[in-house]
Amino acid sequence: MNVNYLPCEIKITQQASTLVLALLGDWVLDANAPSLQPLLDQMLKGSSIQRVIFSTKNLGHWDSLLMTDLIRVIDQGHHQGIEVDTSTLPEGIQGLLKLVYTVPERLDAKRIDAKRHWLEWIGDGALAVIKEATTLCTFVGETALSLWALLLGKARFRRIDLWINIQDCGPSAVPIITLISFLIGLILAFVGALQLALFGAQIYIADMVGLGMTREMGGFMAAIIMSGRTGAAFAAQLGTMQVNSEIDALKTMGFKPMEFLVLPRILALILIMPMLCLYADLMGIIGGSLVTVGFFDVSFLEYFNRTADAVHLKDLMVGVTKCSVFGILIALSGCMRGMQCGRSASAVGKAATSAVVTCIVFIVIADSTMTLICNRIGI
């Protein structure tokens, strides 16, 4: 509903050592409020002013706009040692002002960051690394014990949870895996074509795309996608359970959270990541074929025959093995960050963010290590 407010204004008169402020009109946010700067300047310059009073005879509607301006005037008066009399203000305003000034702001409440010595930075960083390493080793050990209990048939978790996690990690991730892997194949083909076309060796684009996808990019990109999609989801799910005290409730009922919550998620990624890797390889090869066939004088049959000659079983196995390791790292990182989550909503967001960062760091380190090992042993 539209309301026609009267314009607000303030009239300032000085009677001896008293400054009278007459508030006129409607002091609401929708009205055009006058600037208080002239009044504040007069209070600063007027050394003879000892008291400020308000006249609200012609004051209409008011809201937070008036409250904000009054607080500015009162604070200025306290700073100048001028008495500000609020007894003539409406009772509602007096009550709000009483709430504002009931508990004064502590002068030492604001934190001031002191300069830290560089040795302190190094020490804190070393302690943080030791703490993270200890936490990781503990979590990996507990996970190994849960897997051992599974092999002995003593692990307690719901089988339906395993299938739900497989559904979330596998079929639900196929669309994004399809898109990204297809585009990666296109990019590899374009990058290689720019150089190979100079020598008329466009047919070898198939070799580059096939080997690049099967040995490296297929599993690597699938792992990166699953880090952002599944690793963060695991951390958020377990973190939310931590906030709601559901994990504590499981412990109270005699369930081990590592077996009941973490184990199904790890098994789901271990089972599904090799299949996602092979699917990503296929989509990347198809993407590379579209570039090769569409822009160069190469047929589909020639492209796929060349791919079959270039890609061997060991290349597929290298990529699948890497992707399986990536799946374990993603599950460990996501679940570990979720179990470490604090008891607030912001902690859940931090856990999800930390899970993605941890997953990507572990994946890059593991991929580099395994690539060096494969090159060293001639695979």
Image: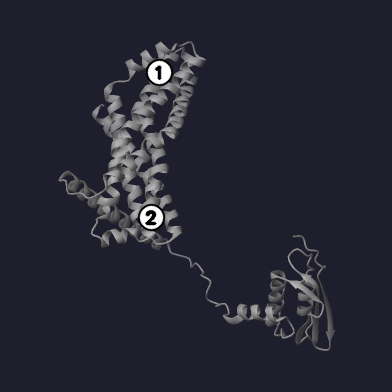
Q: Disc 2 to disc 1, how far (Cα)?
A: 45 Å
Q: Residue at (32%, 36%) from the top-left corner?
A: 272
**Residue carrying label 1:** 206
User: Image quadrant of residue 279?
Assistant: top left
Q: Is residue 307 left or right of residue 61?
A: left
Res. 245 mark:
none
Where is residue 229 shown, x and y percent of the image? 42, 42
User: Image quadrant of residue 331?
Assistant: top left
User: Image quadrant of residue 275?
Assistant: top left
Q: Is residue 372 above or below residue 84?
A: above
Label 1 element class:
helix
Q: Residue at (74%, 68%) from the top-left corner?
A: 28
**Residue carrying label 2:** 239
Q: Is residue 255 left or right of residue 292?
A: left
Q: Quadrant of the N terminus?
A: bottom right
Q: Nearer the viewer, residue 195 or 103?
A: 103
